[in-house]
Image (spheres, rainbow, N blue to C red):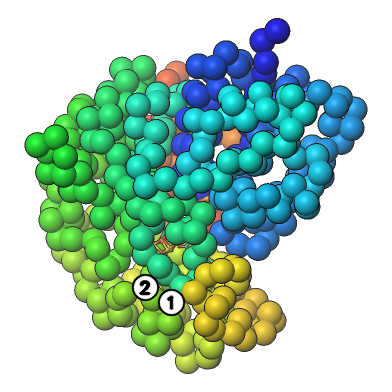
Amino acid sequence: MIKKVYIETYGCQMNVADSEVVVSILTDAGFKTADNINDADLILVNTCSIRENAEQRIWRRLKAISYLKKKNKGIIIGLIGCMAERLKEKVLEEDRFVDIVAGPDSYRELPLLFAEAESGHKAVNVLLSHEETYADISPVRLDKNGVSSFVSIMRGCNNMCAYCVVPYVRGSERSRDPETVLREVNELFNSGYREVTLLGQNVDSYRWDKDGLNIGFSELLEKVAGIDPLLRVRFSTSHPKDISDELLKTISRYDNICKHIHLPAQSGSNRILKLMNREYTREWYMDRISAIRKFIPDCSISTDMISGFCTETEEDHQASLTLMEWAGFDFSYMFKYSERPGTRAARKNKDDVPEDVKSKRLTEIISLQNKLSALSKKNDVGKVLEVLIEDYSKRSRDFMSGRTSQNKVVVFPDKGYYKGDYVQVLIERCTSATLLGKVTKH
Ligand code: SAH
Ligand code: SF4
Ligand code: F3S
């Protein structure tokens, strides 16, 4: 009988891309995908360890999934991804309904692990690799719109940021063969996709020096953008210490490379940045923002901020706020520091900022960002912007929605457009989350 797999994905875009690789591997092994969890023979939960609350959420979800297993003992439950890697066999002690534990570099083994689990044994593979990039695997697309997709160009991370669990759960950094990246993007474009996001924990350090090729991130980006002017290219994440003028110039030269850079600052205080081992200063970060503004004047910039890292004082916190205000970020992802076992900060620094202080500072960071985001959207009112249509609006089938090159969501009345079309939209007003307007040119 044909087996069916159902996969749930938590965490970052990298996990979204990995789930597509996982489904591809299982499809090649004869599985079909189940649209409904109740029809599945194999339930996979692709997990995230970045903050404690990310893991807690997954434990709660696993409890709910266990009920299905109580009803039908034949179901196999697999925990895969970063949390599987972090906890290894301990997962099985925490939740006796889990049958498979597989880390991010052992997905090729999933068919074997499934067979082992079916024969009644717990199956664990959490080996990390220095080479695995799943380069040859054509991911099975799981997105709903068929317009935009993620393409992984590297795995792992070599930057030991003191707070971060990623290097431990994803292993060391390795770049993917550029030929396979280009082949995958070409396939996407030919099957109707109009936007790709190239993914890595630190895309600026992408490097391929093999088979007579010497390619860094700028060159790769240029090659991907060269596939077709109708293909939009995004990328994430850039690291402030590594983002180069050369890259900024490349972005400015191509209309189809999106004018948005996600450049996580984490903190505005030099003392904290040093403790975090981020390897740049506030001044360096500001210089990089100035360079972006100089080479790409219409570029939007977003960031990640952490509040309440070890020893953070009110003065350090104020430095984060003034940096945000100075940079005028278009949007941000903002977090309370969460100590992760085994990281450098967990070993060396006390998690000594009280919870209520962390919360208060986070609230201040969020309310400043709300103000900056509102300003950023107001500045767009009156402009005519190019929008790539992604789908109908969430609220009504009479409206469609898409994004600008700057990654802002735009909603406008549908006059018979299609997903994947480019339209020019006159921005008439904005809400807290979206720009609203009407199409002036199709
Ligand atoms: N590689 C990317 C992003 C990694 S994780 C980068 O370097 O920017 C995404 C974000 O989660 C980080 O930018 C950071 O802001 C946040 N984060 C990571 N570890 C964290 C922790 N222990 N507590 C709170 N936030 C954390
Ligand atoms: Fe984590 Fe730093 Fe690597 Fe980003 S660059 S994944 S924050 S260690
Ligand atoms: Fe991503 Fe979470 Fe892993 S942020 S790399 S899924 S720990």
Q: Secondary structure at mark 1?
A: loop
Ligand 2 under 8 Å from disc 2 Cβ: yes
- Residue 403's label in the rendered image is none
Residue 264 appearing in the image:
yes
Residue nearest the viewer, comparing 215 with 303 = 215
Mark 2 belongs to which amino acid? Arg
Residue indicated by mark 1: 276
Q: Locate residue 125 relative to residue 121 in the image: left or right.
A: left
Q: Residue sitting at 81 percent across and 44 percent down?
A: 96
Residue indicated by mark 2: 278
Residue 142 appearing in the image:
no
Q: Residue sitting at 60 percent across and 16 percent down?
A: 31
Residue nearest the viewer, comparing 60 with 382 = 60
Mark 1 belongs to which amino acid? Met
User: From what the image shows, is residue 98 above or below residue 342?
Assistant: above
Q: Percent x, y for residue 79?
A: 66, 41
Quadrant of residue 275 within the rendered picture: bottom left
Q: Percent x, y for residue 313?
A: 52, 90
Decide: few, some or many residues near mark 1? Use Cα within 10 Å; few <14, some 14-19, many ≥20: many
Residue nearest the viewer, comparing 37 with 78 = 78
Quadrant of residue 192 within the rendered picture: top left
Q: Residue furthest right?
A: 71
Q: Residue furthest top?
A: 1
Decide: few, some or many residues near mark 2? Use Cα within 10 Å; few <14, some 14-19, many ≥20: many
Q: Residue sitting at 45 percent across and 59 percent down?
A: 167
User: From what the image shows, is residue 294 above or below residue 199?
Assistant: below
The N terminus appears in which quarter of the rendering?
Answer: top right
User: From what the image shows, is residue 411 above or below residue 265?
Assistant: above
Q: CA distance from mark 1 to mark 2?
A: 5 Å
Q: Residue sitting at 71 percent across and 29 percent down?
A: 117
Residues at circles 1 and 2 in contact by the CB criterion of under 8 Å = yes
Q: Locate residue 5 relative to residue 175 in the image: left or right.
A: right
